[in-house]
Amino acid sequence: MSRIAAREGAVNLAQGFPDFAAPEAMKRAAGAAIDADVNQYAVTWGAPRLRRAVAERTSTYNQVATDPDLHVTVTCGATEAMIAAMLAVVNPGDEVIIFEPFYENYGPDCTLSGAVPRFVRLRGKDWEMDRDEVRAAFGPKTKAILINTPHNPTGKVFGRDELEFLAELCREHDVLAITDEIYEYILFDGTEHLSIGSLPEMAERTITISGLSKTWSATGWRIGWCIAPKHLTEAIRKVHDFLTVGAPAPLQEAAADALAFKPEYFDGLRATYEKRRDILLPALRETGFRVHAPKGAYYIMAGIEDLRAAGQTDTDFAMALAAKGGVATVPGSSFFHDPKDGVDIIRFCFAKKFETLDAAARILRARLGA
Ligand code: PLP
């Protein structure tokens, strides 16, 4: 859709990346690291300064006690962390439970690692899970459950009660939790983030993934990390070594500085994202989309039931909306294993400058407004 946006001259609210600058101090630190000739391979599993910074943040913010030498692997983004974790722990034929709709990469991650995905639907305006369905998905072949909170594409933030329920099932069935928390600092309306790895007896069976891309607005730097118990970290580091050797060395140094930013940085991030959300939401409501305010991450799932012409799919609708200087979005079918299930949805990304969001709102009102 980003390519289509460029072709059509559309405002791009499709792919999940910011169109605004990354933090100045972090950019300066990267320049300084390059000037200081930090230009060769870092330690394969991560530069010591960055591992210490990740361990410090994970131990305090996420409440998962983390040792930089035993538990941290720095990767090329959360994307590599996820596939390295899956390749390290999944044997072909093992089942992995995935909540649906899901971030597109989890499907190919299963294919590459030989995992058999078991999809469990999130439903309703709060994207709730049906506990009986979740319980039924756990069986003798289940190796792991994949959790993503705050959740792309829905903006759901898993609550304590839900995570305690999932943790109980993981302990009962001896299943691993692989949790993608890349949006952990982007939260709205006072919602709090909770890591399943912080719950009793879960650190030993949880792989927690995060990275620089979203919180520090640097998706192109390709810096991520995963936290896992020692025996899993040993396996993940081996896979990581042969996938990529390591993440960019000078950018790891800058990332170490960025992780040490003061609380005001994270407060400011949350507040400005809430403002961005609150520019797009009313424009979508007024123009006939069915929307609910997301609690976290930077997407809005918009129902197109009342806008879609008979016979038009979500992809047709998204193409028409992007055409000739329109607004580019992602068709809902991208987030379901059966594309039919996403036919009434498109996803908007609001990680954009205020003026980009204002421009998108103007176009929506002009095209779809009453
Ligand atoms: N995980 C989720 C849920 C995402 O939405 C994204 C990007 O959109 C990623 C991971 C990718 O993260 P990274 O840039 O660190 O590879």
Image: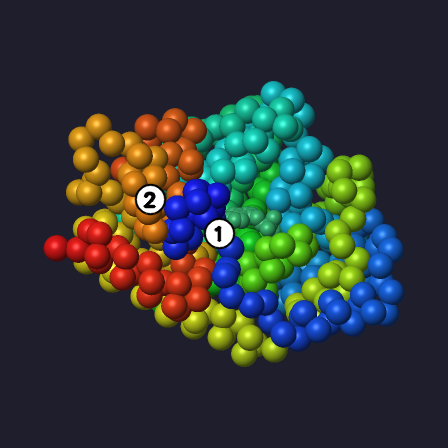
Specify few, some or many for label 1: CA neighbours under 10 Å numbering under 14, 14-19, or 20 or more. many
Identify the mark at residue 329; answer none if there is no mark. Answer: none
Task: Indicate whether 14 appears above or below 251.
Answer: above
Residue position marked by numbered label 1 in the rendering: 16
Task: Indicate whether 281 appears above or below 112.
Answer: below
Specify few, some or many for label 2: CA neighbours under 10 Å numbering under 14, 14-19, or 20 or more. some
Q: CA distance from mark 2 to mark 1?
A: 20 Å
Residue appearing at x 69%, y 39% in the figure: 84
Q: Nearer the viewer, residue 152 or 116?
A: 152
Quarter of the N terminus within the rendering: top left
Residue position marked by numbered label 2 in the rendering: 323
Q: In the displayed structure, does residue 150 sit left or right of residue 365?
A: right
Q: In the displayed structure, does residue 44 sit left or right of residue 66?
A: right
Amino acid type, label 1? Gly
Residue appearing at x 78%, y 48% in the figure: 246
Asked if ligand 1 lies within 8 A of label 1, the reply is: yes
